[in-house]
Amino acid sequence: MDLTVSGLEKVWLATSELEIPFTQIKRAAVVSLDALKMPPIKRFGKRLSRRNASGRFSGGDENSGTELWAVHGGDEVLVLDLTGASFSRIVLQVDDPEAWAAKLSAALTTEESQSE
């Protein structure tokens, strides 16, 4: 899966493109921003609020991974839980997060059934 960002987002995320091998996606889900706990430590980026944050954040202990957030308002976001990647989670504001989550979840299910 390739993500492309533009404008100031490139600055806050410190990248213009992010490649996520599909095998590293454990779960894709739509989550309410109100239900998400934002990691307290900003590693790089900007955080104006939980609803307006772009960058890399972590929980502050050795067990918490780094999360990439690109959120600019709205109520629901696409959350990708990852394994074996440089990020443990990616939180994205996208158009139609339900459709993205359904597409990715269906592809994950297909990949799992083919690998068995």
Image (spheres, grey):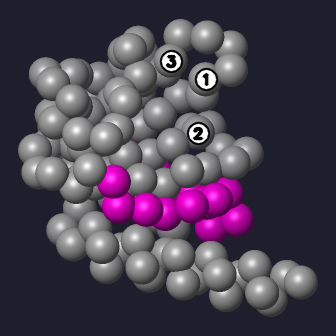
Say what secondary structure mark 1 lies in: loop
Q: Which residue is mark 1?
A: 64
Q: Left or right? Give the position of 84 relative to 59.
A: right
Q: Nearer the viewer, residue 86 or 41?
A: 41
The residue at the point 22 percent across, 55 percent down is 76
Q: Position of residue 61 (x, y in %)?
A: 61, 11
Q: Which residue is mark 2?
A: 88
Assess whether residue 24 is covered by the magenta stretch: yes
Q: Left or right? Give the position of 116 relative to 106.
A: right
Residues under numbered marks 3 and 1 in contact, where contact means CB atoms less than 8 Å apart: yes
Say what secondary structure mark 2 lies in: loop
Q: Quick one: label 3 or label 2, which is nearer the N terminus?
A: 3
Q: Which residues are magenta?
A: 13-31
Say what secondary structure mark 3 lies in: loop
Q: Position of residue 66 (x, y in %)?
A: 53, 28
Residue farthest along the right direction in this orientation:
116
Measure how far apart labels 3 and 2 are at the Cα level: 11 Å
The picture quadrant where one finds residue 46 is: top left
Q: Nearer the viewer, residue 46 or 106?
A: 106
Q: Given the image, on which type of amino acid does mark 3 rest?
A: Gly
The residue at the point 35 percent across, 61 percent down is 30
Res. 36 mark: none
The picture quadrant where one finds residue 10 is: top left
Residues under numbered marks 1 and 2 in contact, where contact means CB atoms less than 8 Å apart: yes
Q: Given the image, on which type of amino acid does mark 1 rest?
A: Ser
Q: Quick one: label 3 or label 1, which is nearer the N terminus?
A: 3
Res. 59 mark: 3
